[in-house]
């Protein structure tokens, strides 16, 4: 019995291209952006432009600034840690750490590493600083 007889008559189809559209969250929900996606976006000029257009870095700056200076609305510990992880992935590339350094975010994270009353937050800050050292520029800044 041939394959044609087993399955009946069928037409052959070819797939030339598959397009997947992913709707990314707005700046109000930046902490929901998958962290591994940030790590991939920062690798390309187009990805960096996307992150800049959504103002995620500015959002992260506000979260850290509000937490450190106790400005209302004070973000939750979970929001601060999520923001730190975003910044860690973003700053793990030369292009990202340069932008974070220009915006003085690196200094805020170092301050939190020493002054946060929460042990888990100090540990997260130390780990994020380690992520910055993945790039040559980041290593030079931290020395």
Image (cartoon, rainbow, N blue to C red):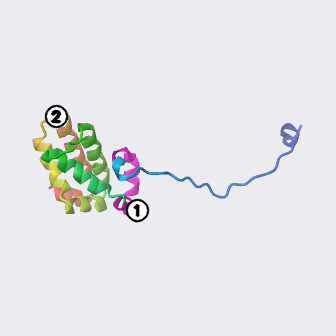
Q: Quadrant of the N terminus?
A: top right
Which residue occupies the extreme front position in the image? 72
Residue at (28% x, 49% y) in the render: 88
Lower sequence index among marks 1 and 2? 1
Q: In terms of image quadrants, where is residue 100?
A: bottom left
User: 40 or 130: which is nearer to us?
Assistant: 40
* Viewer can see residue 116: yes
Numbered badge on residue 119: 2
Asked if the magenta segment contains residue 44, the reply would be: yes
Q: Secondary structure at mark 2?
A: helix
Asked if the magenta segment contains residue 38, the reply would be: yes
Q: Secondary structure at mark 1?
A: loop
Numbered badge on residue 44: 1
Q: Residue 32, position in %: x, y?
A: 37, 44
Q: In terms of image quadrants, where is residue 75?
A: top left
- Please state if 40 lies on the left or on the right of 59 as rendered: right
Main SS of the magenta part reads helix
Q: Residue 38, position in %: x, y?
A: 37, 52
Numbered badge on residue 126: none
Question: How far, Cα to Cα, is label 1 from label 2?
Answer: 35 Å
**Crowd class of label 1 (few under 14; some 14 to 19; many from 20; radius 10 Å):** few
In magenta, the rendered stretch is 31-53
Q: Residue 30, position in %: x, y?
A: 35, 49
- Please state if 2 lies on the left or on the right of 58 as rendered: right
Q: Residue 46, position in %: x, y?
A: 42, 64
């Amino acid at each position: 019995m041939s394959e044609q007889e087993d399955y009946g008559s069928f037409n052959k189809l070819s797939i030339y291209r598959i397009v997947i559209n992913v709707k990314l969250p707005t700046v109000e929900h930046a902490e929901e952006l998958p962290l591994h996606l940030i790590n991939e976006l920062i690798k390309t000029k187009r990805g960096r432009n996307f992150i800049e257009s959504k103002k995620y870095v500015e959002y992260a700056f506000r979260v850290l600034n509000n937490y450190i200076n106790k400005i209302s609305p004070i973000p939750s510990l979970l929001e601060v840690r999520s923001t730190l992880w975003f910044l860690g992935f973003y700053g793990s590339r030369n292009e990202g750490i340069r932008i974070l350094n220009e915006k003085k975010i690196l200094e805020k994270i170092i301050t939190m590493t020493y002054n946060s009353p929460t042990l888990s937050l100090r540990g997260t800050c130390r780990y994020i600083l380690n992520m910055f050292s993945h790039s040559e520029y980041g290593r030079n800044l931290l020395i």
